[in-house]
Image: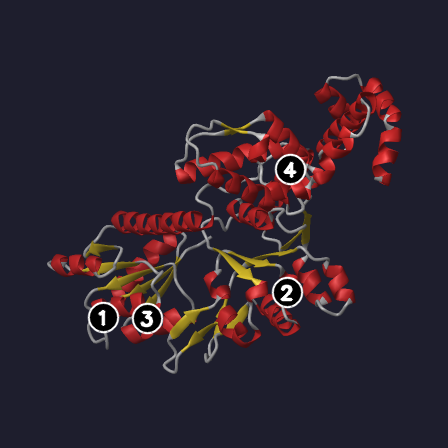
């Protein structure tokens, strides 16, 4: 996507020269001859970079004063100073004052493009690294080898380059934001921002300034709204079902016009945004209950993605455990510890109503509570009691078994053992038989023979 570069110089020849050079490299140049014009251009829309002359003769503010204004009101815009021969000391002062680099006049076009490319790339990497550090401390990826995950990976690769609006649905904790970020990373907008609009936190009284931003009486931007922050990138609207109806109507207008007016502002700001939304609530049901706009639903749901709960893809649990373990080790520099096969097996049999998020939090909690440096393996007794109590149906009722003869107790054990592995493999007889070391036909016979145990457990 073409980068927007604002050229601020009092010499028309210099403005024209730089504009032509940037156009040849597929950049989108804008020009201003003084500080007032520059601030007016900034209010119309934020550029990706400012090329700023140090002196700006005949201007209300000179280049250094304008640099200070830009950093005060627009701290995330990199600036390259243009200095004349003999102004190197001043250019160095500008670098210390926050400029990203400088170029001395007269300059060769190759030198200009080299500096522009370098500053933009360094700024992109700085933003990317900051976001990764804040969000996760590591790469974003889908973990697992189940059929559901493989299909999802293929679908993401197919739709990411299109630019179409996407609605991601699924239970809480299934990874909707992760999928949205992957789509952004694999799209043509990957160099642009990924901005999250957390709909449950969108306060109706502050909706206008949160979405559109705010200007002061002089027409200067006091605050950038989420829509402007997401320009040339992706806006992820999380849990859109929580939006008030008035906000929904506002979003519809923005999607229609691709523009908005800041609070207290007069000029219309255009945006180029890809919108990805998510919901863990049935939006069609919300539409029937008059809680969600049908118009907005169809505008957002151009490409639907339905994420599977973890309980239907338990084959991925061992991979997820290993992934979160490595992530914990990398972030905390803790000693390498592994989960025993028995722990992995029983965790694979659990239902995980909180899905991947619950599994991740559980592993992190286990690792934090293990404070003995001599421990090299997580065993069953180290699992949190509340996790085991949530999944009592997967455990043997030992008190009840103690009251039975050996033959009946063995049947109870066999029932619980086989049933836990059937749950682990989502009812797949072939996989269960292969894991426990039985022929498929033999497992069928065993299940039939344990019918009476099932009936006894139902009446307990």
Numbered badge on residue 170: none
Q: Mark 2 against mark 1, which lies toward the viewer?
A: 2
Q: Earlier in the sequence, mark 1 or mark 3?
A: 3
Which type of secondary structure does the marked residue at label 3 adopt?
helix
Q: Which is more N-terminal, label 1 or label 2?
A: 1
Could you classify mark 4 by the number of other residues whose Cα lies within 10 Å: few (under 14), some (14-19), or many (20 or more)?
some
- Image disc number at residue 38: 3
Q: First in sequence: mark 3 or mark 4?
A: 3
Contact check, label 3 and label 2, Cβ < 8 Å? no
Distance between the Cα atoms at labels 3 and 2?
A: 40 Å
Q: CA distance from mark 1 to mark 3?
A: 12 Å
Of mark 3 and mark 2, the one earlier in the sequence is 3
Reading the image, the residue beneath label 4 is 149
Question: Residue lying farthest bottom?
Answer: 217
- Tell me residue 12's x, y (percent): 27, 67
Which residue is label 2 attached to?
A: 242
Q: Are marks 2 and 4 in contact (CB under 8 Å)?
A: no
């Amino acid at each position: 996507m073409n980068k927007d570069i604002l050229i601020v110089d009092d010499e028309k020849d210099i403005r024209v020269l730089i504009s032509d050079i940037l156009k040849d490299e597929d950049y989108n140049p804008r020009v201003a001859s003084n500080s007032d014009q520059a601030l007016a251009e900034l209010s119309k829309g934020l550029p990706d970079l400012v090329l700023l002359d140090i002196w700006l003769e005949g201007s209300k503010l000179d280049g250094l004063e304008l640099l200070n204004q830009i950093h005060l009101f627009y701290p995330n815009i990199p600036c390259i100073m243009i200095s004349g021969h003999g102004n190197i000391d001043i250019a160095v002062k500008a670098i210390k004052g926050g400029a990203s680099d400088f170029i001395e006049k007269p300059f060769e076009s190759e030198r200009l493009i080299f500096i522009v490319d370098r500053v933009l790339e360094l700024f992109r990497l700085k933003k990317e690294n900051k976001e990764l550090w804040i969000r996760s401390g590591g790469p974003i990826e889908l973990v697992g080898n189940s059929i559901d995950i493989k299909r999802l990976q293929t679908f993401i690769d197919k739709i990411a380059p299109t630019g179409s609006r996407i609605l991601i649905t699924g239970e809480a904790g299934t990874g909707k934001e992760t999928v949205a970020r992957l789509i952004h990373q694999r799209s043509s907008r990957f160099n642009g921002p990924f901005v999250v609009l957390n709909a449950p936190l969108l306060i109706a009284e502050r909706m206008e300034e949160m979405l559109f931003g705010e200007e002061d009486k002089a027409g200067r931007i006091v605050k950038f709204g989420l829509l402007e922050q997401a320009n040339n990138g992706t806006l992820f609207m999380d849990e859109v079902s929580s939006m008030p109806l008035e906000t929904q109507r506002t979003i519809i207008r923005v999607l229609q016009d691709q523009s908005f007016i800041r609070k207290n502002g007069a000029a219309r700001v255009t945006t180029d945004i890809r919108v990805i939304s998510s919901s863990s609530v049935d939006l069609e049901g919300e539409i029937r209950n008059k809680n969600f706009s049908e118009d907005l639903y169809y505008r957002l749901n151009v490409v639907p993605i339905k994420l599977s709960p973890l309980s239907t893809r338990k084959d991925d649990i061992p991979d997820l455990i290993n992934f979160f373990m490595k992530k914990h080790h990398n972030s905390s520099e803790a000693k390498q510890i592994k989960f025993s096969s028995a722990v992995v097996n029983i965790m694979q049999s659990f239902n995980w109503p909180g899905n991947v998020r619950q599994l991740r939090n559980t592993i992190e909690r286990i690792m934090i509570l293990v404070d003995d440096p001599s421990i090299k393996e997580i065993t069953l007794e180290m699992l949190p009691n509340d996790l085991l109590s949530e999944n009592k149906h997967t455990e043997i009722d030992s008190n009840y078994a103690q009251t039975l003869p050996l033959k009946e107790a063995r049947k109870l054990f066999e029932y619980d053992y086989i049933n836990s592995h059937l749950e682990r493999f989502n009812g797949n007889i072939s996989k269960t038989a292969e894991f426990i070391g039985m022929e498929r036909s033999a497992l069928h016979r065993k299940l039939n023979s344990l019918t009476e145990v099932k009936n006894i457990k139902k009446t307990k």
